[in-house]
Every structure is written in structure tokens, then in C-alpha cells.
Amino acid sequence: MRRTGSEGGVPRWILLPAAAGAAFVLLPLLAIVLQVDWRAFPALVTSEASRDALLLSLRTSTASTLLCVLLGVPMAVALARTRFPGQSLLRALVLLPLVLPPVVGGIALLYTFGRRGLLGETLEVVGLEVAFSTAAVVMAQTFVALPFLVVSLEGALRTAGHRYEVVAASLGARPTTVFRRVTLPLVLPGLLSGSVLAFARALGEFGATITFAGSLQGTTRTLPLEIYLRRETDADAAVALSLVLVVVAVVVIGTAGQGRVRR
Amino acid sequence: MRRTGSEGGVPRWILLPAAAGAAFVLLPLLAIVLQVDWRAFPALVTSEASRDALLLSLRTSTASTLLCVLLGVPMAVALARTRFPGQSLLRALVLLPLVLPPVVGGIALLYTFGRRGLLGETLEVVGLEVAFSTAAVVMAQTFVALPFLVVSLEGALRTAGHRYEVVAASLGARPTTVFRRVTLPLVLPGLLSGSVLAFARALGEFGATITFAGSLQGTTRTLPLEIYLRRETDADAAVALSLVLVVVAVVVIGTAGQGRVRR
Amino acid sequence: MTFELEAEVPERGVELALRVAPGETVALLGPNGAGKSTALAVAAGLLRPDRGRVALDARPLTVTGGGGQRASYVPPHARRIALLAQDPLLFPHLDVRANVEFAPRAQGAGRAAAREAAERWLTTVGVADLADRRPGELSGGQAQRVALARALAADPLLLLLDEPMAALDVAVTPAVRQVLRTVLAGRSALLVTHDVLDALLLADRVVVLEDGRVVEEGPTSEVLSRPRSAFAARIAGLNILTGTWRGGRVHCEDGSVVAGMSSDPAPSDGARAVAVFSPGAVSVYRDAPGGSPRTVLRAQVTEIEPHGDRIRIRTTRAAADVTPQAAAELDLAPGAEVLLSVKATEITVYPA
Amino acid sequence: MTFELEAEVPERGVELALRVAPGETVALLGPNGAGKSTALAVAAGLLRPDRGRVALDARPLTVTGGGGQRASYVPPHARRIALLAQDPLLFPHLDVRANVEFAPRAQGAGRAAAREAAERWLTTVGVADLADRRPGELSGGQAQRVALARALAADPLLLLLDEPMAALDVAVTPAVRQVLRTVLAGRSALLVTHDVLDALLLADRVVVLEDGRVVEEGPTSEVLSRPRSAFAARIAGLNILTGTWRGGRVHCEDGSVVAGMSSDPAPSDGARAVAVFSPGAVSVYRDAPGGSPRTVLRAQVTEIEPHGDRIRIRTTRAAADVTPQAAAELDLAPGAEVLLSVKATEITVYPA
Amino acid sequence: DDAGDGGERVLTVYAAASLTASFEELAERFEAANDGVSVELAFAGSSDLVAQITSGAPADVFASADQSNMDKLTAEGLEGSAPEVFATNTLQIAVPPDNPGEVSDLADLSDEDLAVVVCAPEVPCGAAALALAEAAGTTLAPDSEEQSVADVLGKVRAGEADAGLVYVTDVIAAAGDVLGIDVPESDAVVNDYPIATLADSDQAELAQAFVDLVLGEQGQAVLAEAGFGTP
Ligand SMILES: Nc1ncnc2c1ncn2[C@@H]1O[C@H](COP(=O)(O)OP(=O)(O)OP(=O)(O)O)[C@@H](O)[C@H]1O
Ligand SMILES: Nc1ncnc2c1ncn2[C@@H]1O[C@H](COP(=O)(O)OP(=O)(O)OP(=O)(O)O)[C@@H](O)[C@H]1O
Ligand SMILES: [Mg+2]
Ligand SMILES: [Mg+2]
């Protein structure tokens, strides 16, 4: 038994611009793949620097995605489900890292968490020094990726509405229970795609990282930094490394997509 | 008369991480504002180069957001509302520009639409030379921003479900009518936030632009490129210009937010 | 456990006061849009009235400020009031069993206890075999039954039921009604229904709403046998005419005069009075009847429908039950002009 | 315009065939989950059966392949079949008027014509004053009326109505039923309902579904006066006992023997037969009655409810209508053991 | 090239980002001297510029910040005139104005406890830093190997780093935000800036005129003011 609303529901002509859009994205990817020097590829990709960079990227992106979820979910819920004066200004401000050129974001982070930044001394007293550490990479990635999660989750929360939350409350569930058992499961697709966006953004992050965290192999030099550096001497190597990033991304997005379809 | 589900519905403790997240984003912004040399600010911001860059940025970002909507809405609909073999692979591929370091994206675009690229000769025959023109800026921005629109819109489409579309079809509405009168209005919040994301991403785009379009004042040097350039010589100027970008962004996001709330 | 509610929601044209005594079941009757669901929403704390007060025993639940009162508001989950809304709204991400387990679990019951409660309530409403389904895979009636089980499993102090049986089939309705009777017996409840049988069987008292106002309330049997409002008469299947009591008769607005047996106490002269009579007491004529003086009303037929072994003729003034033969002889069709006559002995008149 | 439907949807346990003659209204009756909404969804093209065929006149709408047939599928919008589903699903972003205008506009009507049609249908269902509201601001019954108006405005060849009056109040139900009678008169329609009155007043023929299968069909009055299925008997308010016809009596599974007047043609010996009798013909005793030989059934009281001026006693075997006095004397309560006796002359027996 | 309207001739100059200030001034002078000519300047990292020119970017002149990127261009045969070195640059230690690390010479940069940043060996300034350390007989202990000089300078300016190795011109451009400490061995590691016209230019004469301006007296004066050495 199949429902329709699949083929039946979509106007045919829509497939034309959809295909054009897909081609616009896919052709450059194809062009890159065609450009890769496959003989040199294995050596390039398995070099120590590349492996360090890839592992660091995966570790930091995962950490910052987690941080994004921990901070971003509450932010999205607060934005979508409460009302307070100045809310739309706050929303706009919170989304700012979206537009801030990443390098400027890095400068801002330096001014804030750097040794001489707003909080630098406070942090130093506590014994925390983030400068040139992996923690700084995670912070930079979180800073740029957080708004992605917040925006997509807030949209999902608004689309889902809060009728089910109301029902749950009337059944005696405390707000925390409602949040855990109703709100979160209901917006799971939105949370998933938001997390994918955040992970992707963190994985590709360059400007804020180099500005705030620096670039030292194994500590702060993530894959994008490695790619940029390689590019100075060997554009083909950079392209080959990019391909690695692409494959990682396809795996991540594909997995998340699976999860979404299963629901 | 007020509904609850506003204050009533959200667990109190959630405001704590939400505030922490907001602080994490807002403090660096504050740090930047504190850093701006307000005396030099007017001169900096109104210089010809700055104005050119700002105008170019606004023009190209608007154009590429439009392109994203034209291509991305059909793509999101096709991904969310049809089923075909290889769909999740296609989704993952289409979302790739999300993770591709922008410079690599720019290289890919050069490999495709550049003079020596895949389509370069074809385009040249038609008399089109896109690389290093304003059109190239728009293409670079569209390439990186498109997935943002697609992801958030697809999420919204899935969350909204297609029950209303089914009803509309059973009332005799052709797919195109359903699309225009039901699907689009229903996911308007998702489309709006997707467009904001796309616009923001286009506005902040740097790497792909400098690689594929170059950096020529008035033609291809957008505000982020201008900021980057200024940073080489005068970091304060870069920060001041960033502030302009931030203000533009606040206005755009704020306006879109208004539109969403009104609904 | 006395429940009291006073609420003004001008946006919806609602302004009413209700009271549910300990252990009492009150039926809320009224036309579509009368404000029944609104009243339940205010009771459950899902809607804050502009002005009003909701209290369970001495415990204030919703108090809008003003008039010397301190404003206060107990959130829905802390009220121990469960609402079965008009729309089942089963949680789409949970299966049927988990939906019913939700309330016990939320209230701190253990896994086993919650499962046991779910099993029991699902069996009670007759859908135990659907426990593993997702809500999206249920029929309309099945979903409503699950929603009912879910609300019952919440074991509240006050139960609010909004048309709990609207989508149930005739085969299961009596059984579910029986279940509700047991469940509601020891419990305070507010029940919205469009079915007179629900009111009769389940409610101790009925409150009739019209246009957001309480137009009538009282013990079920009394309201349904001696309705004062048009809607109560309609739901009780009785005819009602309102007018002024003058010279031992009811003078209606349209000039017709109704003679009837006045109740004890009789209405005072010049006061508003209602005349109530059953459709079975009405005779229908095409031409003016002779004989003993009766109340005669001029009316137009609006609907004709079977009613048990008789035919119910609805007209612009009153309904009449006639035999199929009579209906055939009179050759009645919607739009036909008829005269309705009722013997004075069949009409009860009492103060409005 | 003959409508034919044959469908197997194993996932929902549905396998049925239906036919609607030109201009005919067919009522689909059956318990919750019987497959009524599923049948409508297949007809509207919202659900593709695993195997089946849907056709309007000679025009195939859904044909699953196999058996020499070419698979084909006409999308919902091109079928000229309108569906009023069980859930109103008004477009939340359009106001009430725009919701009703939707179908005319989608079918190419001009702005003015669509508005005129919307005005007309909204007036017909009695919610013209709500035209400017958003669906979120309607009560349950109001939303259902708007959904009805929206479906009617689609002016289809075949109209599918899924419980169109479930949430309506008693004051408006007769009027809406009247409207439907007019609307359905010249049109083919499939009507799902749980109300026997709808079937009686609106349908030419009824089809009874149980567990996804057609268990009975025929002209309305025939099915409701001589039901062969338990559900049809239940909805008609009649008692039904099934068994084997042997020696001029019906032998039920539980050993009881029912004597009755056999219909013409009588069932053949050894064949399945049904005995049908009205609750009014049943007498209730606590101890075995003496007197002329009668059918006596041993049963347990399950529910007691008022029924007009009598009391309906539902038992495990059959329902009985007794006077309030008799009920009081018998001191009946759910769970009580009783004996039911029915005079043979009151029982009609016919082949199952 | 059609970037200019109204019959104006447009000369497009691709120059390394570190030349921004100097070339903006030279462009103005060139426009003043040549009626009806406007100079479009495109600044970016030298390698970016080479990649663009290779991909068909419409440039007339290319000024690189190092020899190797110019070599990439000549390898493709895209140069119009033979590249000529027009400026040199040497390294300096940059420290925050209050010099918190009390850095005085190159040897201090091998102190593990100091936050030291240099360019990565892959980029020209990093290669130069490496060579400088070798010449001075020390090993640097960097906390970060940055992508570009601007990144190094940014960290020092923000006080995040105690010291960094940058070009003299960068310290001058930072105008007091950082303090420059001369390294005696720096003369051993001189970075050359070559310039050339491009083969694809359709106004070779004008391009050559600009190159001549840069190589000439005026050009050298402007460059010297920015801290560049003369070849
Ligand atoms: N969210 C809302 N906003 C504004 N008005 C509303 C809203 N919901 C309902 N109304 C209006 O308030 C009035 C009372 O609605 P309510 O839902 O309480 O009626 P009801 O008695 O439950 O009717 P029904 O029998 O149809 O369910 C109606 O006129 C309705 O149109
Ligand atoms: N989406 C679905 N997926 C799987 N099974 C379903 C789905 N929808 C309904 N069913 C099942 O199919 C059967 C028929 O359902 P259907 O909705 O047709 O019943 P119905 O006769 O309309 O009942 P009701 O009177 O309760 O509306 C039921 O057993 C139901 O649980
Ligand atoms: Mg209601
Ligand atoms: Mg159904």
C-alpha cells in the first residue's frame, strides 16, 4: 500500500528548477573530483599532518556540536516558547555570528576570552588559559555554529506548535517532563537537521579558528586550516584533502538523513 | 486574554543554559563594540571603498538569496515530498557546500565555470564570461548559501506534513495550485528563516568569492573582502566595517523575525 | 472537593460561572460556539480569562487581579485536573500504550504500574489490541477511545471531558457510557455533550450555555423535563414557547396565546413564563380544527424525520409527532403551512 | 455516473467492493475501525490499494496492475470527487471564507463567483457570520460546519462525507440534515455515519462494514427493519440472534432455542438463520415465567438507560424496553441475572 | 576590459595584500598622471592572485609578495614582461607595546613559556622565519604557525601572543599597536617582491607604464615610506 502525495502531490514543473539547483551544486563537486590526482591521493590523505588535522576536526566538531545542542536547544526553546520585551532584538543579536565574517568573529572572541580580553583575566585567575589550545578551536566553532542550530530549531518549534505540550501539561506533566517527553521528540527532525548544519558549519570553520585559536598541527590546525595551508604550495593537495572533508560530510549528513526518514 | 504555554510551559532551568548561550554570543559582540574607535568611525564607514563594498554586498546578497529561493524551494520540495532511489545520497551531496571550506568551493566553481573549467568553453561560445564579474560573486554566494535554504525548508516541510495538501487535492486543486496556495503559505515561517540564513550566509561569504570572483572594488569586492583587506593594514578599520555588517544583519533578521511573528 | 469557576473571556464572548460539588458530575450543554470548550480550557488552566477566578476547594487556581484579590495562577500540570479535549491530539511520536502511560509516568508512577494502568484503561475502552500502534494508524473512533483512556489514566481530582463519545460507534457507545458512569461516580467532573442520553445517564446536574452565558441550570431530570431555555427543550425533545403570563395564559411575542396548566408556584401576572409540551401532544391540521378550545399555532413545516414508529414533523413553532398514516394523509413536505393544536391539559406553564 | 470501487488494503485488514448508482446516496455503517474512512480514502485517490479498481462510469481512476489490467491512477484533484474527512483540517492560513472559496477558485471560478458560492454555503450551514475568522478561532462544531461547506462548494460528481455531523449540536443537526438531503438528492454520494437517522433520511442504500468486509447491504429500510448483521441490528435498535435453522427453530451457539415466525422464503433446514425482534417485545423476569411456550433467554444486565418514556435494559443477549415501574420492581442493576422472554409472534426469522 | 564607462581606460592591477596602502597611493598618482585612466586594484594573498590569473582573471599587472608565486605564473607563460624585483622586505620581532614577555632577541623566541607565533613554513613569511632562525642558530618554539602575516600581527596586537615574527612593513603599518624589535640576522633573509605585466593584457603599454612607475623614483619613495627596502 502506498500513499500518494508523493508523486501525485508535486507539480511536475518544479522538478526543472530543482534539477537546475542540484546541477549547480553537483557540477562543481564533480569538477573537483575530476581534478583530483588519484595516484598521489593515498599518500596525501594518509600523511601525518592530514591525519592529525582530520582527527582534530572530527573531535572538535563533535564537541562543538554537543555544546551547540546544550546551549542552542534551550535558546531556541526560550525564543520560540516564551515572550519577553526585547525578544526580537535578542533574536537578531543571537543570530549575528551568522553574518559576521568569521575572522571578525575570531577577533571578537580574542577581545573577550583572550588574555587581555573582557573575561581574560577572570579566566586566568581560575587557571583557564584558552589561548592556542584545542578548547579555543571548540569555542570558535561553537560561536559560528550555534546560530545555525538555534534558527532551524526555532523554526521547527514554531511549525510544530505547542498543542501537544498543552495536552501533556493537562495530563499532569511538569514542564521538564513535557520538554523531555513531548517537545524534544516532536522536533527531533528539526533538531537533527539543526545539528547537522551546526556540525557542518563547525567542520568547515576556518576564519574564526585561525584568528582566535591559531594553527598548530595536532592542537589547533583543523582540516580546513590544513587545506588552506596546503593550498599555498600545492592547490591539488588542497583539493584532495577537501575531498576527504566532503566524504566525511556525506557520511554524517547521510546518517542524519537516515535518522530523519526513519521517524 | 492570554494563552499560557508561554511562561507556564517552559521549564525554568532551561533559561539558565539559554542565558549562558546568549552570553557566549553576545559578549564577543559587546567586546567588538567596545573596541570600535568611534571618532574614526564615520569617516571609515562612509569612505568610497566602504560604500561601494556595502552596496555591492547588499545587491549581490539580495540577488543570491533570490536565486536560492528560486532553486532551493523546488529542491526542498522535491526532497521532502517525493521519493526516488538514491534520494538520501542526493540530499547529502546537495548539502555539501555546507562543509566544503569556502575557498575550495571557489576552486570548484573555477573548475566548472572558469575559462578552463568544465563549462567554461561552452559558456565562452555563448559569449558569457562569468568568472571575476559581479555575476561570479552572486554565483559564489548562491553556491554556499543554497544548502542553508534547502535544509531549513526541507525540515519545515517535513514537520508540516502533507495532510493539508491532500485535502486541497481532494477539493480539486491541481498540484501547482496546491503548491502555491497551501504548501508555500504553510511553510512560510520555514521559508523565511531559511531565506534569512541564506541571506546571512551570502552576506558574510568570503572564501569562495575571493577565489572565484576576485576582489575588485565596485565589481567583486564585497564587504567581507573589504574587511579582510583592511585587516591587513588596519585592524580597527576592519572591526568598524564589521559593525556595519552587523547592523545591516540585525535589521534584516529583525525584519524577517517580525514577519514571522505576525503570522 | 468543590470546584468553582468564574470567567470572562470577552474575546470569545464568554462570561459565566460554574460550580461542581464534591463527587458531582455536571453536564455542559449548549449549541456550537456557546463556550463549552472555552469553559473547560479555563478550568484546566490552558486559557487565562480576562477576569475570573478558578478554585478547587479553598485552593485558588486562577485568580485574575483586581477587586482586592491577589492575582495567582497555578500551571495546568499542578492542578490535578485532566482534560479530554475535543480533538484527540494523541502524541504522534508515542505508541498507543505509551500515550496512555504518559500521565501515570508523568505523575511519578513506576514503569510496571503505568503499564498496568494503561492495559486496564485500554481494555476498558475496548482498544487493548491496538496498544502497539502509532496514533497515525488509528481510525477516528479508535483515536478518540485512546484519548479517553489517556485522560482517565491521569486519575485527576476533576475530570473535564469534551464530547468524549462523538466519534464512537453505536455498538460501543453504551459500554463506554457505562464505563464513564463507573469512573465518574466517585469523582467530580464536567462533561460536554450533545447527546441527551449522556446528560441523563452521567450527569447529576446540567448547565446550559448559550452565547457564552449560563441560561439554565439545575438537576438533570428537572431541566430536561421542565426546560426553560430553547436549547434545553430542544435537547430534551420538548417544545417550548416563551411569553408573558397574563390572565392565566401565555402571550407570545407573535400574538399567539397559549393556554396551559400552570405549575405550582404559578407565574405572577405580567411576568415571563414558558409553556412546555411534548411533540406527542401536538396535533397537526391543514385547516383550522373545530371542537373544544385549544391552543392553535400557525406554522410552516421545516423538516420531517422518522422518530421511532412515528414521524416527527418539525415546524417553525414546535415539533409534532404523528403517525405515518396521518403524515401521509396530510401530505406534508417542508414548506407546507400547517396549524398545530395542543390541548391545554398537555401544556405545563411555569415561570421563566 | 456509476461509481465502482474494489479494494484490498491488507495493512488495514480491508477488502471490500462498493457500488454507487447514478444519483444514489449510500450510507457506510460499521463499528470503529471497520474500514469506512479507508474506503473513502481509496475512492478519493488518497490511498492506493494493494489490489483494486476504482472507476467512475467507464473512467478508471485507480487500477492496480495484474490480471491483464493496465495499472492506472488518476490523481485526486482530477477525479471530481470531494472528500469531507473525519478531521475538519481547515487550512490554518486562510480565513473561513477563503477556505470555502478554495475549491471553486481551484477549479477556475472567478473571484466573485467563488465568493458568492462561499457566502451561500456558509449561510446554508449556519456560520455565515464567522466568514472572517481564522480556523484557530472556531469551536469544534463551527469548524466541522465550515469543513462541510468547503466540501459542498467543490461541487463534485461524487461526494464523500465522513461523519459530517458528529460534532454538531442538536439545535442545528436537523437543519443541516435537511440541507444534506437537498444537496445529496441529485448527486452520487457515500456517507459514513454512526447515526441511524442519517442513514434513514439521507441514504437510499446502506452498506455495513465489519472488520474491513462488507457484511450486509441493501435498501436502507430493508436493512434496518430486517438486519442480518449484529451491527445493523444494533444501529437499527433491534435485537438479533443468529443460529442454525432446524425443526422450525433457530438453535443458537449457546444452546438456547428461539421460536419465531419464519419469513418468506423460509430458511432451509440446517442453514444459518437470524432471528430479529424489537426490544419492546422483550419481557424481563428475575424468575422463570410460566404460561404459553416462549423463547426464554438467560442473560446478565450490562447497561440500563432511559429510552423515551421507557427504560432500555441492555443485557448480554438482547435489549429490552420496560416501563420505569417494571424496572423499579425488578430492582435491576448492571450485573443482575435476568430471564428474557419473547413471544414467538414477535420474532421474525429469515436466512442469514 | 569593459569595467570602465565613458571611454575611460581601466588598468587592472593585481597586488599582494601587504602592498595595499602603497599601491593605493601609487594608483592615485598614476591616474593623475594619465588622463582618462583609472586603476582598479585587486588585493589578495599572492597565491590567490596567481590562481585567479591562471583561471583567466582580467589583470594587466601582477605584483607578488614573493618569488615563488611569480614563478608559478611564469611557469604558465602568462607574464608579459620579465618579472622585476621592485621591493624587498625583512623580518622583525613584533611584541605588544608593553612587551610583557620581555623579549629582546631571537633567542627568546625559543622559550617554551612564551606565547610565540610565526607564519607556517608553507607560506613565504614562514619560510623566511625558518631561514632566519637557522641563520641565527636557534630553533623557534611557536605556539601557532599562522596562515598569514596578518594573523601573526593580530595575535600580537591583541596581546594573545608575547612575540611574533612579521615584516618590517607590517610593524610600520600597525602604527604603534605593536613594537618592532630588530633582528641582526634579518639581512640574511630578504624577501623579494617581483612585478610583471601580463601576457593577456590588451593594454600592454599602459601596464608597462605602471610597472615603470613602481620601479621608478616615485614608486620607490612611496614604498620606502611604508618600510620596504630597495632591491
Ligand atoms: N482561539 C480562539 N480565538 C478566538 N475565538 C475563539 C477561539 N476558539 C473559539 N472561539 C470562539 O469562542 C466561542 C466559544 O467557543 P467554544 O469552543 O468554547 O464553543 P463550544 O461551546 O465548545 O462549541 P462546540 O460545541 O462547537 O465545540 C465561539 O464563538 C468560537 O468561535
Ligand atoms: N494510517 C494507517 N496505517 C495503518 N492502519 C491504519 C491507518 N489508519 C487506520 N488504520 C487501521 O485500519 C482500520 C480501518 O480504519 P478506518 O479509519 O478505515 O476505520 P473507520 O471505519 O473509519 O473507523 P471510525 O469509525 O473509528 O472512523 C482500523 O483498524 C485502523 O486501526
Ligand atoms: Mg467545543
Ligand atoms: Mg473513520
Image: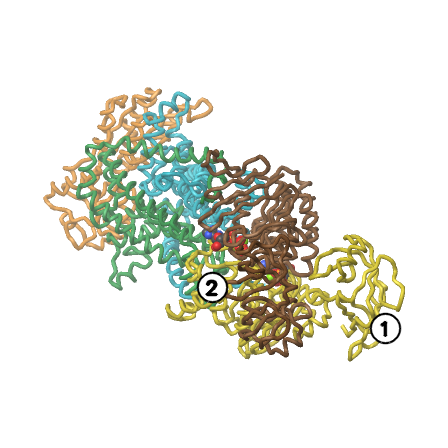
Chain colours: A green, B cyan, C yellow, D brown, E orange
Left or right position of B35 against A125: right
Name the residue rendered at 13%, 48% in the picture: E107
Chain letter behind tag 1: C
- View extreme (front): residue: D247
Picture quarter containing residue D233? bottom right
Q: Secondary structure at mark 1?
A: strand
Left or right position of D244 against A29: right
Which residue is label 2 attached to?
A: A168
The one nearer the camera, E157 or D297, is D297
Mark 2, Cα crowd under 10 Å, few <14 / some 14-19 / many 20+, is: many
Q: Is residue C48 visible?
A: no
The residue at label 1 has a CB less than 8 Å from ligand 1: no
Q: Residue flagged by tag 2: what amino acid is it?
A: Ala
Name the residue rendered at 50%, 60% in the picture: A83
Contact, mark 2 vs mark 1 (Cβ under 8 Å)? no
Q: Residue flagged by tag 1: what amino acid is it?
A: Arg
Name the residue rendered at 31%, 26% in the picture: E61
Q: Is residue C167 visible?
A: yes
Q: Nearer the viewer, mark 2 or mark 1?
A: 1
Which residue is label 1 attached to?
A: C246
Chain letter behind tag 2: A
Left or right position of D277 against C238: left
The one nearer the camera, B20 or D218, is D218
Q: Position of residue D109 (x, y in %)?
A: 65, 38
Q: Position of residue D22 (x, y in %)?
A: 64, 41
**Mark 2 and mark 1, same subunit?**
no
Give me the disc on residue C85.
Answer: none
Q: Which quarter of the rendering shows the N terminus of chain C?
A: bottom right
Vertical position of residue C150 compared to residue A36: above or below? below
